[in-house]
Image (cartoon, helix red, strand yellow):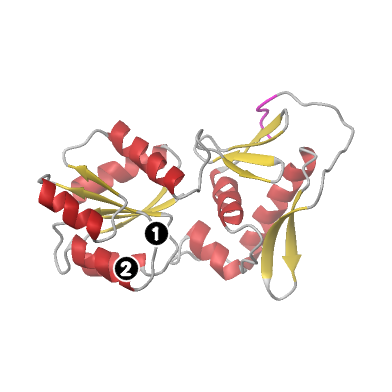
Amino acid sequence: MKILMVEDERYLAEAVARILEKNNYDVDLAFDGEDGLDSALTGVYDMILLDIMLPKLDGVSLLKHLRGDGVSTPVILLTAKGETEDKVLGLDSGADDYLPKPFKTEELLARIRAVSRRKGELLPEGVLAFGDIELNPSKLILSSGDRSYNLTLKEGRLLEYLIANKGTSLSADAIIEKVWGYDSDAEDNHVQVYISFLRKKLARLGSSVKIRNIRNVGYVLAAEGNAKDGRGSAKRSPNG
């Protein structure tokens, strides 16, 4: 999951980012409302953590701008303001949740998971499912039936993006922007390499899920019936 945190307290933002990254979230930071709005409008983020008291553009105005432009990315407001009227204003402006400062990181992680579930992105266990596969994006485990393989961080993020857009063709440029970042120097061949890694692991699992390459369009995740390879069961969670 790719998260944008808009917070002008750099020490806090960087500390939270480190914790989220240890939990396998991909985090970008913005330190004022204008930069936060520019980043949020790219549409590459799965969630936004947004402070209200920001320089240049306050968080509520930023949120109203996003919702007015049709951006439905889930937003959790993080703010020192804890009064009821502030919570009501934030929620009525389009926020999905509200967490007053100071907060414990365990609660923030729980709220991120809860908002993701409400948006239909995750199963109750925090697992993404498609066809006969399941992906645990926090533990980076891909499984099908009684077989399971560990993924690298890039493999996990790529498969998470494909599952979130199942049935939709994704260009190499869109994948690079989402998985590597819009300011990355990654190229099409990087995408091809990681697509190949995922295809091999799906094949080893005997999965019916395929990553199809549509010429001059991009990649699409598809489930194509029940794949059986007759190799028997593998032990759960081997390194692959």
Q: Residues within 10 Å of mark 1 (few under 14, many from 20)?
A: many
Q: Would you place residue 211 above or below residue 15 in this image? A: below
Q: Amino acid at mark 2?
A: Leu
For this rendering, which residue is in front, 214 or 132? 132
Q: Which residue is mark 1?
A: 73
Outermost residue, right side: 230
For this rendering, which residue is in front, 203 or 79? 79
Q: Quadrant of residue 33?
A: bottom left
Magenta segment boundaries in residue numbering: 236-240
Mark 2: secondary structure: helix
Q: Amino acid at mark 1?
A: Thr
Q: Which residue is mark 2?
A: 66
Q: Would you place residue 57 above or below residue 15 in this image? A: below
- Per the picture, the main secondary structure of the magenta-coloured stretch is loop
Image location (x, y in percent) of residue 69: 35, 73
**Is 169 contained in the magenta span?**
no
Q: Residue, x 54% and y 63% (percent of image)? A: 176
Image location (x, y in percent) of residue 204: 78, 39
The C terminus: image quadrant: top right
Q: Quadrant of residue 19?
A: top left
For this rendering, which residue is in front, 185 or 93? 93
- Kindly indicate whether the residue at mark 2 contacts the one at mark 1 (C-beta within 8 angstroms): yes
Image location (x, y in percent) of residue 77: 24, 51
The circle on residue 216 is none
**Along the polypeptide, which appears first: circle 1 or circle 2?**
2
